[in-house]
Amino acid sequence: MGGIGRSEFGIVGRGAAQRRRRGRSLVAASAAVGVMLAGASVAANGTTVAGGNGSGSGPDQLSGPAGVAVDGAGNLYVADTSNERVQRWAPGASSGTTVASGIFRPWNVTFDATGNLYVLRCCSNPAVLRYAPGSTTGVVVAGGNGFGPAANQLWAPFGGLHVDAAGNVYVADAANHRVQKWAPGATSGVTVAGGNGPGSAADQLNRPEGVVLDGAGNIYVADNNNFRVQKWSPGATSGVTVAGGNGDGTAANQVGRSVGIAIDAAGNIYVSEWFNHRVTKWAPGATSGITVAGGNGAGSGANQLSVPWGIAVDSAGNLYVAERGNNRVSKWPPGTPPTILGAADISAAADPGVCVAAIANPVSATGVPTPVVTYNGGAWPTTFPVGTTTVDVVADNGIGSPAVASFDVTVNDTQAPIAIAPPDPDVNATGPAGATVDFTVAASDNCPGVSVASVPASGSTFPIGDTTVTVTATDASGNFSGTSFVVHVAGADEQLADLQQAVVGVGPGQSLVKKVEAISQAFAAGDIAAACDRLQAFGNEVAAHSGKKIDESTAAALLADADRIADVLGCSA
């Protein structure tokens, strides 16, 4: 793995032996982190488009590649750091062609609008070299005055290089904790971000390693030791955090140690986290990122990265990653928005004896990365109750807008409820129309939501005689059962017969018995007026003997019966 160690990370000039030791420690540490991250990625697989044939200097090999750029024709330009050259790989090529060589530690490459190639050189005399199309000789356009903090110097730039449409060169000047802008033809740079010493304040950077600009001139900086990406508006004296800023780690809202940074036409920010072996994508305004490459620990598998460094995004959204640990450049296709499948209405029978149904989840979602799917804001329910439940589905993978769908799950109760009737009511009429009768009907079922009704309803006026009442119980699924009972309303004839029984042995002799017989005879003859007169005589006699020959409670009961019969006969009218 020649060249993988970040031998130049410390102060330049400490000796080859120390650099080699630091290189080994970097590989070991990053591999250990890879174990912790295994299985964390939701990205698709990548394919090798340059190198991948072991560390070496052959045309089909790379050694510790640190930077990558892609032109409009799809040609890849790779900063082949440990081989001190820049290689061009045509689309689909199995080997590369050297377009620049003899460059001490080239850490990144990029282009300007006219096709000039720019190479970031490190480290004893850091500089940016510009190569005209077809030229193998570069000219210094930034730095080249030894390493140091002066305006005409750079110090340990390990990958941050960008050229804007006007030809201004931007360099993440790591050891000076600043970003320098070099205008065309300038002999020194001006600080456009940081430059206030190492720190985490809004106007500070701490070993910035990557830089890129958007079309509006905003500067985005991979602020390595602050585990964040800072955005500096044109002319700003401080930046704002647009990714990470939550300490070192692998959570979705964190940015680990990072170098490569890119931005696409939609404003999405891509960050190469070399210590986390992943590339994360942050949508504009997002508070967390999604893994779009790697994230499955350090390794050479199709779903893995090893020490990802420089990155580039082409116009089709393909991501290219220079992997120092795998001596290759891998290409990762753009994500695809989520699509929800199988969200159709469901009808099922409740499980026997219970009021729920266990229903398997019919929904799936496609997309890259794999979408996260929620149902009414949570997981798919294990059971659904009797009735209709609307399920709102959301599938989100951070690519475009979340996909949404809605469908109904209807669970039917297959068991009919049981209608329950009261005992047959037997009441006395209270008037010519009959009597108002109250009763209670009910139903039993193993599921809630049962309604019960009767015809006629409780509280209705029932006519004299027998009336059949039907009772119907209906559940939420439309199952029903019925039963019936009879309401009997006794008329004047039945009440007079009861009165005659009540007066036997009551009062003086058989006088009351004879009076009730006389009332019954008049009623039977249809002579209601006579019946009413005789009822009045009966009442007068009962009242006269109340408390004497008839005890008061018996008298009160007999008078109440007489009054009710009079109402039924319509005597008061």
Image (cartoon, helix red, strand yellow):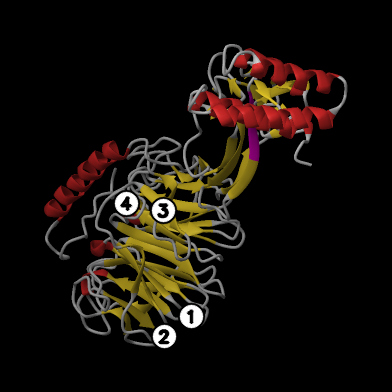
Q: Is residue 457 visible?
A: no
**Magenta span:** 407-412
- Mark 1: amino acid: Gly
Q: Is residue 571 visible?
A: yes
Question: Mark 1 and 2 residues: CB-CB less than 8 Å, in contact?
Answer: yes
Q: Residues within 10 Å of mark 1 (few under 14, many from 20)?
A: some
Residue position for label 4:
274
- Residue closest to the eye, 294 or 62: 294
Q: Residues within 10 Å of mark 3 (few under 14, many from 20)?
A: many
Residue position for label 1:
167
Q: CA distance from mark 2 to mark 4?
A: 30 Å
- Disc 3 vs disc 2: which is toward the camera? 3
Residue position for label 3:
280
Label 4 element class: loop
Question: Which residue is found at the position 37% from the left and 40% from the top?
Answer: 40
- Mark 4: amino acid: Trp
Magenta span: chief secondary structure: strand
Question: Mark 3 and 2 residues: CB-CB less than 8 Å, in contact?
Answer: no
Q: Residue furthest front?
A: 509
Locate residue 487: give its quadrant. top right
Q: Earlier in the sequence, mark 1 or mark 2?
A: 1
Residue position for label 2:
183
Q: Residue 572's spot in the image, x, y percent?
A: 75, 40
Q: Earlier in the sequence, mark 2 or mark 4?
A: 2
- Disc 1 vs disc 4: which is toward the camera? 4
- Disc 1 vs disc 3: which is toward the camera? 3
Q: CA distance from mark 1 to mark 2?
A: 7 Å
Q: Earlier in the sequence, mark 4 or mark 3?
A: 4
- Residue closest to the eye, 351 or 457: 457
* Residue 78 versus residue 200 in the image, above or below: above
Say the numbered circle drawn on residue 244.
Answer: none
